[in-house]
Amino acid sequence: MKGNKKAEELFKDASSLYEEALKELERGKIRDAAEKAWGATAVATNALILARTGRELEGAKETTKELHKLAGEDRGKGETLCKWTASVSPRIRARFDPQSIDFL
């Protein structure tokens, strides 16, 4: 990893935001949960790019381009991501009870 220390800090921040999103979801605060989840995704994306390339990117267009480039380099490694996603998805679904959400 090229941006190791800073990338690790960003991953910790992303993890913290993710946990906050799950707590907001448990409280039925969908918008707050979504904002935190999106923030966690953005921070984790930046951390990944920094860790793999040593570069911090500024804009969404540049980030998307770099993600596509990394995805091309990682062809065949997708099975690990699929396993991780499968392990996380039930955890998220278990915390989401549409009957307990107050939309108003």
Image (cartoon, grey):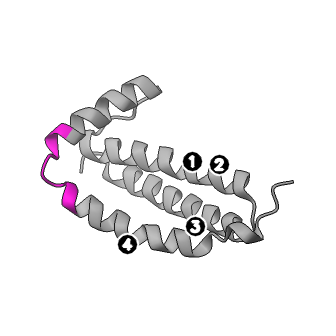
- Percent coordinates x, y for residue 7 in the rendering: 38, 51
The amino acid at mark 2 is: Glu
Sequence-earlier tag: 4 or 2:
2
Residue carrying label 1: 39
Asked if labels 3 and 2 touch by Cβ distance under 8 angstroms, the answer is: no
Residue carrying label 2: 35
- Percent coordinates x, y for residue 42 in the rendering: 49, 44
Residue at the location (12% across, 52% down)?
A: 76
> Secondary structure beneath disc 1?
helix
- Percent coordinates x, y for residue 83 in the rendering: 28, 67
**Is 24 situated above or below 76?**
below
Residue carrying label 3: 19
Residue at the location (30% across, 48% down)?
A: 51
Q: Which mark is residue 87?
A: 4
Q: Nearer the viewer, residue 31 or 43?
A: 31
> Secondary structure beneath disc 3?
helix
Query: Is 102 placed left or right of 64 in the picture?
Result: right
Q: Which residues are magenta?
A: 72-79
The amino acid at mark 3 is: Glu
Query: Is 25 placed left or right of 7 in the picture?
Result: right
Asked if labels 1 and 2 touch by Cβ distance under 8 angstroms, the answer is: yes
Residue at the location (53% across, 68% down)?
A: 92
